[in-house]
Amino acid sequence: MDIRTFDTPEAVSLAVAARVAEALGARSRVVLGLPTGRTPTGAYAELRRLHRAGVASFARAMTFNLDEFAGVPPSHPGSFRTFMEAHLFSGIDLPAPHIHFLDGAAGDLDAECERYEAAIAAAGGIDLQLLGIGSNGHIGFNEPAEALVARTHRVRLAESTRRDNAALFGGDASRVPHEALSMGMGTILKAAEIVLIATGARKARCVERMVNGPVSTQLPASFLQLHRRVELFVDAAAASRLPGGGAAGEEPRSGSGGSKDPPLRDGP
Ligand code: PGA
């Protein structure tokens, strides 16, 4: 993994947005995989700004979001589809037919997962997949478990994940659905390039385990060690448990991967 460390979450957001803008400019047609969550909102705001400034165009891009709550229609205020509209889609020139989303209100959720997997394949696969990481090490809604499902699938949400998403449901975790639909780790690992964003001390422990811990279904993000082109954009707080972590540097470093050593030093 190439690790890029920045002093602040704001600096991470600018760098991620620049990375996406570069990808949009490099090819005539780009298929993006997109996350929701608090972490990418700064990058999305910067991408809207770059679009307004005429620097970034999504006119020829296609997007596939990672996941969606089950039983929640796209128009629901708590849906990830609504979140993306508010934070990104409403402020850029991405044509509506180019937006792909899992439909949490589909009658047959298993068939919906199959449809999505086929749609990604029909688009030629994902060129650049952006990811956040849950404080429990989940990616999309691939929660820590004894086994992971490779393809897009239905998933039962961890209680910690339901609590983390309470803000979308009026601050009431009991209103967060118990189930979701999510790309699988296999779907994600098929992306040509992956950019994972992590900010804040709350993510420091899972970032350290993701980079240096064993590959384990108990930390789904650790599977990214098996991908050849992963870039990790982190702020100093999220990097604080990495060896030499917390120091912002210009040059990407590589994670050692596979080491079972404990963290070399504690974060704040
Ligand atoms: P967060 O969520 O960005 O709100 O921390 C990340 C995730 O759960 O993937």
Image: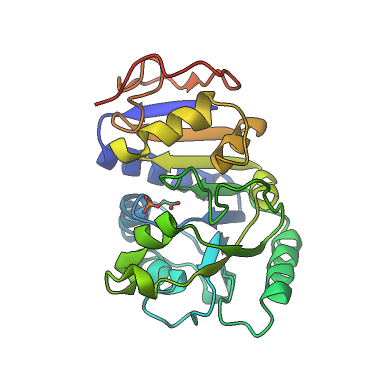
| Vertical order, 51 against 258 (above or below) | below
* Residue at (53% x, 54% y) in the render: 140
Residue 205: name its quadrant.
top left
The x, y position of residue 156, in whole percent, is 56, 63
Percent position of residue 79, x then y: 43, 73
Q: How is the image coloured?
A: rainbow
Could you say where residue 23 lies in the image, as x and y percent from the top left?
A: 53, 45
On screen, 26 above or below 140? above
Horizontally, residue 219 falls left or right of residue 15, namely right
Q: How many marks?
A: 0
Task: Name the residue nearer the viewer: 155 or 125.
Answer: 155
Q: Is residue 259 visible?
A: yes
Measured along the vertical axis of the image, is residue 232 above or below residue 261? Answer: below
Where the C terminus falls, by quadrant? top left
* Residue nearer the viewer, 257 or 12: 257
Q: Residue at x 44, y 28 (%)?
A: 208
**Quick check: can you spot residue 90?**
no
Does residue 265 sit above or below 116 in this rendering?
A: above
Residue 165's image quarter? bottom left
Which residue is depicted at the point 64% across and 52% down?
126
Q: Position of residue 176 (x, y in %)?
A: 41, 71
Q: Quadrant of the N terminus?
A: top right
Q: Which residue is pictured at 48% across the width and 41% down the height?
A: 196
**Residue at the bottom extreme?**
107
